[in-house]
Amino acid sequence: MIFERSILSRIMPSSVPNFAEPEFRYANGVEMWDREYSSLATIPSSHRSQPSHAVKLSLSSLRLRQGSAVDLGCGNGRNAKFLAKLGFEVSALDFSERALDLTQHLIANENTRLDITPILHDIRDGLPFRDSETDLVLDAYCLCHFIDEIGYKKALDEVSRILRPGGIYLKIHLDSSDDYYLQRSIEKRSFGHISYDPANQFLKRHYGAEKLHDELRSNFDLMRVWRVRFDDVVRGAKVSRSVFAIALTRKPHE
Ligand SMILES: C[S@@+](CC[C@H](N)C(=O)[O-])C[C@H]1O[C@@H](n2cnc3c(N)ncnc32)[C@H](O)[C@@H]1O
């Protein structure tokens, strides 16, 4: 009866899904990301060569141009390339080999040399960088896939650990009013909701910027928020997207 239950949870999004059920067995696993990049291409960012609108907007208004940057969950490398072209030394990290193949391909196809180091690594094992060594951590739609609270908090602590004091955590997030994911909401949480897309088996957290900031207050101070709304096409259907970028600075460690 698992299907009945999963249908029910979509009709009544406040009911709590059981993530141990077979429907969720592969959700957010590396195999699903490999499959996404090798054949499925269900999410627009998997096959987009242009950097995210929100990354471009926020970095140009912060006038950030150089330093060391870590691109968490770099995917096909589109944002890492943008950062490198601005002048950053970029560590492009992902746990999907297929994603890193695409990133390598993108570097190899560029006429100019891009300072990008691809790193195959699972963020759940911590971040492979020294304390305070990084100027910028970009998290474009990556840690939103960490739906268990303990793993998510651990990853945020790692981001804070590797940033220098005053270093910037730039997070790009599909907010809680994004049309596409509102239709796929399966669980309400205090901060917003969790969505589940059966087309690719990805679970994702969605917030408003204020709620997200509340959650990050212990490690970071808020610098600025940008809202980006744009029309998009997901698997042939028009959707209106609602995204925000939030820039935070790392607080000094006690
Ligand atoms: C929605 S995609 C975003 C890709 C890219 N940042 C972009 O904006 O185009 C999320 C990425 O996070 C990566 N990812 C998810 N969980 C991860 C983990 N535990 N460790 C490393 N990478 C992870 C996935 O492989 C995927 O490439």
Image: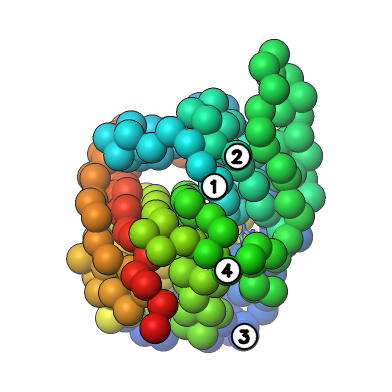
Image mark for residue 69 = 1
Give the alpha-carbon distance from disc 1 to disc 4, as whole Å: 14 Å
Amino acid type, residue under disc 2 in the picture? Glu
Which element carries disc 4, helix, strand or loop? loop
For marks 4 and 2 on the same chain, the one whose residue lies earlier in the sequence = 2
Question: Which residue is disc 4 drawn over?
Answer: 131
Camera sees residue 59 = yes
Q: Is mark 3 within 8 Å of ligand 1?
A: no
Residue 245 coordinates in the image, percent (x, y): 32, 49
- In the picture shown, does residue 15 fall above or below 45? below
Q: Could you tell me which residue is drawn at 49 percent across and 75 percent down?
A: 157
Q: Label 1 sits on what residue type?
A: Ala
Dot 3 surroundings within 10 Å: few (below 14), some, or many (20 or more)?
A: few
Spatial CA distance of label 3 from label 2 is 40 Å
Q: Quadrant of residue 116?
A: top right
Above-or-below relation of 13 to 201 = below
Q: Nearer the viewer, mark 3 or mark 2?
A: 2
Asked whether the beta carbons under mark 3 and mark 4 sit within 8 Å of each other, the answer is no
Q: Amino acid at mark 3?
A: Ala
Give the SS element for disc 3: loop
